[in-house]
Image (cartoon, helix red, strand yellow):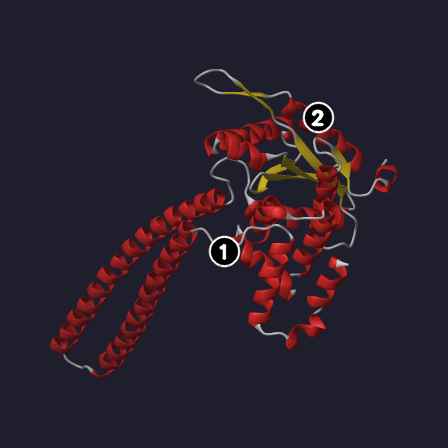
Amino acid sequence: MFMNAVRTQVRPSQRVQYSSQEWAKRALQLMSEQGVSPTPRHYQLWYTYASGEAPLLNRMIDNCIAHTKRVGDELSERLYLKFFGAKGENALVQETGQLMHAELDKVIARLNSAESDTTRFGNVLMEYGDDIADLADGDGIKALVSGLARETKEMEIKTRSLESELKKSSEEIKKLKANLDTARAESMIDDLTGIGNRKQFDCVLKMATEDSAMSHQPLSLVFGDVDHFKKFNDTWGHKLGDHVLKLVAQQMKILIGDRGTPTRYGGEEFAIIMPDTTLSDALAFAEELRISVSKKQMKTKATGVALGRITMSFGVTQYMAGESMDAFVERADCALYAAKSAGRNKVIPADALQITAAE
């Protein structure tokens, strides 16, 4: 009943009938019904859902409601990070790019000035050529040659100055380009875990889906989520929570090697892009990673007291030719939520029928 009511509320054709105040009221009502704390981040998420401005977000929340009945704070936070937490360009990339543009503007201005000087020098030579034809005495020719030598010397000085400035600018642009490349690389790395961030995920997945569509080679996607992470954080603190995320990322890097790209998708959710990998192989990898992580025993450094083991849930899917990136991601995410709904610490494919098709 609830889902039917929500779908009626967010139908695009009806959006014009509601004001922003009405969307706000609906968002707060939905948050109350779903047991979501009224924080600014959660409000932004549920206002977007109520207004129907992001169809993919609406499908995600509908799937969550279908599997968990009540979304709650944990899923709301994860969805917020997924849709709103990775926006904005890295400041260093912007700054370096602006410096490069400024340096190039200087080069262009200097070249324009040099072109103007060259044109003027050419005109002077033509004038002197005309004057030489009219001269009959030696003194006149001597004065003309002297003036020509003076103009030539001045042009030589300007040319050498131009060469020096262009050399400096070339060296500066090379440095800025190196800085920009470094900044761009750093902007795609998650500061905490050292693996790729959401921005890298988006870039790599776009290229991977395009390559798969052209080469007809398989492409699989693994979504993983640390089970009960919020409870762990609340019980033992964010410092240990950060340690858990680092440990998971390290295991991902070790096991995936050069077979794929591990990324932190948002919060405690991870994603691994696996080119040239069938669904069966991706499921086997996810199971290997699940077991590897579950063997890690967390202990306090000070006392050595055991804090319990880490478990993860995984959703796995294989790319289907012609589908959009959003659809591909959504299927993996739905499989992940199914794994969590089925009791956590499991690996579930987006579509069990794909296993047969991929083998």
Farthest-out residue, bottom: 134
Q: Amino acid at mark 1?
A: Pro
Where is residue 145 shown, x and y percent of the image? Answer: 18, 71
Which residue position holds label 2? 288
Q: Is residue 54 left or right of residue 300?
A: right
Rounded to the nearest angstrom, the CA distance separating label 2 from label 1 is 39 Å
Where is residue 32 shown, x and y percent of the image? Answer: 61, 55
Q: Is residue 343 left or right of residue 230?
A: right
Quadrant of the drawing holding the C terminus: top right
**Which of 136 and 47 lies nearest the eye of the viewer?**
47
Where is residue 74 shown, x and y percent of the image? Answer: 59, 44
For the question of whether residue 219 can be seen, the reply is no
- Residue occupying image coordinates x 55% and y 32%: 232
Where is residue 84 shown, x and y percent of the image? Answer: 55, 54
Q: Is residue 128 above or below residue 244?
A: below
- Residue occupying image coordinates x 34% and y 50%: 172
Q: Amino acid at mark 2?
A: Glu
Farthest-out residue, top: 304
- Residue occupying image coordinates x 38% and y 49%: 176
Residue 40's disc number: 1
